[in-house]
Image (cartoon, coloured by chain):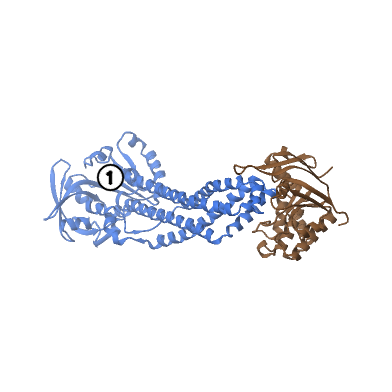
Amino acid sequence: MLIAIAWRNLWRNKLRSAVIFSSIAVGIIGAVFSDGFMSGMTDQRVNAAIANEVADIQIHQPAFLLNGEIRYQIPRAQRIAQKIRTLPEVKGVSLRMKTQAMAASANAGTGINLYGVNPADERKTSDLHTHIIEGKYLSENQKIPVVIGQKLSRKLDLGIGDKLIVTLTDSSGTITNSAFQITGIYKTANDRYDAASVFVNKKDLAKVIGYPASSGDEIAIRLKNSRNTPAVMKKLNRIFRKEVQKKRIILQSWDQIQPLLKSMVSMMNYFSYLFLLIILAALAFAIINTMLMAVMERTREIGMLMALGMNKRKIFLLIMLETVLLSVVGAILGLLFSILIVNHYATYGFDLSSVASGLNYLGYSSRIFFRVNTNFYVMSIVLVALIAVLSSISPALKALKLQPATAIRDMI
Amino acid sequence: MSIIEAKGIYKTYQETKIPVNALNGVDLKIEEGEFTAIVGPSGSGKTTLLNILGGLDLPTEGDIFIEGTNLKQLSSRQLIDFRLHNIGFVFQAYNLIPVLTARENTEFILELQKVPKKERRKQATQLLEAVGIADKADHRPGQLSGGQQQRVAVARALASQPRFIIADEPTANLDSKSTNELLEIMAEMNRKYRSTFIFATHDQRVMDKARRIVTIDDGKIIGDETFEGR
């Protein structure tokens, strides 16, 4: 009956309860919206980084990581790549020849990362071929083709069919030049990547540098499901234990290659909860105020309950139940609306095209597809209930301080 | 043995700088089955005395025994429990829990006493029938007249099967018809179940029904009359 009394008491002052329901609901919607937005944004950044840029896992010779020189070739790279391709979790493996170079047109020049890739393998490993906005992606039958980002094409003022002059160091340490013909221009959401990443056929690059086309200094591994990355990392470290121990190769997952991205994901999570807590802490004061008012208005009634023989524990419980119900109803309302909003933006995306250039510069897409973990929803309800319990302490103590005779004296 | 025995009761309120002596040495015995009115002008101390008899307040000096139990020796928790099982209350107003129906209000006290659900439903229905309000069992207090509300309060007070019932100005807000009906119901309960009723009142109609009238003024008993045959 205590629950019935607490529940029905909520509806005695409908306007006041409605105000609290709405404030909690709006607070929750705000917190969920911001979490959905931030998670969606980081998700897209992470997914894009994995899909277009770094893949799930990379293998290098340890020394390569220090200065990125092409002479640090992965020993027996073909065999390693072949072995990894047989794993069921793996979607694609690309043995790349990566080097730093200078790209130039008649007008300008800039530093780039030059990737020599086998188009067929690269297609399975990277989604970059789906981002071609002009021309075609690399293929074996084109003549010295090169694919560049839109940003670089604008910087160098080059288009499809134009020649890109690349200056690089060959295997003997000599500076050498080579010309490639632009066959495709891509655009991802990451401008800085687009300005600095250039793709050519590995066999063409191998000729220029003087290494066999079967060699490579980077193995990029793309998994069928990125959530398996830690498990596959463990598996690969076991398979290539000897090579790893002898420091012939080093394995890195995407979050090790781009630690900033990883820390951004954790930071966004942390901020979401912090934001939720700040909102709830502010709401706690509104809840305390409402319940104090309710207790003061009901002094006589509480006095009557005490006179009849309702003990202090039950009075305390009644006030606490009322506060928790008041808050949780608001939270549930808020969550229902939040789920609708998140689902809408998860499907159609939240359009930020007005600030697209700034977002693209930072590597973010201008359409954000929201995502909220079930955990966040559950935690919202748990935190609201917790805050409600804490908020009920002061009003409940106030109720307990009442003496039945004094409370009832007001009545007569 | 008397149900209630008050010995040398003094009560001083110290809420402001000047202490107020509400009771100045009251001795009173109440026997089982009494239908007693405590009367006196406003501020005479009758509500204070009633609160002390009902265990809602403790005397500053003196002792109050209910069937041999000295209320002053009970902890506040024990006192609450004692009231629950031994004393019924009917107040002047704000008697009922506004969000519960008449039946639920009556059952409420039984639930506090941990009576099983089926049993309390049965008892509550019987009591509401006894006070003539069974047809309004599912109405909330707001949907009942003042007289009907007081009848529910009487039903609830009786539900706990208390040793006695304290009623503080139960008719103060009622019209003549409702007052007469309520008094008739309480008198009948008193006759039928030998329930002990103690009223604080200055309503002549209540005094006319009472079999004993204790008059109090300035915190002292100044008159104690018994009217046989009422």
The foreground one among A348 and B64 is B64
Q: Residue furthest right?
A: B229
Instruction: Bin the neighbour count of mark 1 within 10 Å (Cα to Cα): few under 14, some 14-19, many 20 and up.
Output: many
Location of mark 1 (residue)? A218
The foreground one among B194 and A339 is B194
Q: Which quarter of the rendered picture does the N terminus of chain B lie within?
A: top right
> Is B137 displayed left or right of A320 in the figure?
right
Q: Position of residue B151 (x, y in %)?
A: 74, 60
Q: Is residue B127 above or below residue B27?
A: below
* Residue depicted at x 25% and y 58%: A186
* Residue depicted at x 31% and y 48%: A54
Q: Position of residue A212 (x, y in %)?
A: 22, 45
Q: Colour of chain A?
A: blue
Question: Tag 1: residue type?
Answer: Glu
> Is A12 displayed left or right of A78 in the figure?
right
Q: Colour of chain B?
A: brown
Q: Position of residue A356 (x, y in %)?
A: 28, 59
Q: Position of residue B62 (x, y in %)?
A: 74, 38
Q: Which quarter of the rendered picture does the C terminus of chain B lie within?
A: bottom right
| Chain name for mark 1 | A
